[in-house]
Image (tube, rainbow, N blue to C red):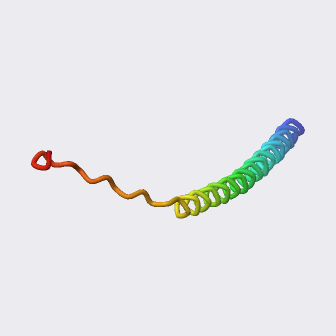
């Protein structure tokens, strides 16, 4: 009878350890996911700001007139 109770107690302890490890791993995964989401949002914001700055710079450039093609008949 004692042996049975000891085995049950060991199984209970092992289950508790596995649950604690699982919870720890899940917390780590969630914190990494949150950090990744924050980093992605920051990079997206920087990219959009750069794109907007590029568009503004392109709008300020003077438009060069297109060169007319010389046809063979005109030569």
- The residue that appears at 31% across and 52% down in the rendered structure is 67
As drawn, 52 above or below 9 = below
50 or 12, which lies in front? 50
Residue 37 percent location from the top left of the image: 69, 56
- The residue that appears at 81% across and 47% down in the rendered structure is 24
- The residue that appears at 80% across and 43% down in the rendered structure is 21
Residue 75 percent location from the top left of the image: 14, 45
Q: Residue 7 vs residue 69: left or right?
A: right
Q: Residue 57 vs residue 26: left or right?
A: left
Count of numbered circles in the view:
0
In the rendered view of the protein, which quadrant contains the N terminus? top right
Residue 34 percent location from the top left of the image: 73, 55
63 or 16, which lies in front? 63
* Quadrant in the rendering for residue 13: top right
Q: Which residue is at the far left?
A: 73
- The residue that appears at 38% across and 58% down in the rendered structure is 65
Q: Which residue is at the far top?
A: 3
As drawn, 38 above or below 1 = below
As drawn, 32 above or below 58 = above
Q: Residue 8 vs residue 53: left or right?
A: right
* Quadrant in the rendering for residue 63: bottom left
34 or 49, which lies in front? 49
13 or 71, which lies in front? 71
């Amino acid at each position: 009878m004692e042996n049975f109770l000891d085995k049950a107690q060991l199984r209970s302890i092992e289950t508790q350890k596995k649950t604690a490890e699982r919870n720890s791993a899940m917390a780590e995964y969630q914190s990494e996911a949150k950090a990744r989401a924050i980093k992605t949002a920051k990079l997206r914001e920087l990219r959009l700001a750069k794109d907007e700055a590029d568009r503004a710079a392109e709008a300020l450039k003077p438009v060069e007139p297109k060169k007319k093609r010389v046809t063979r008949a005109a030569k």
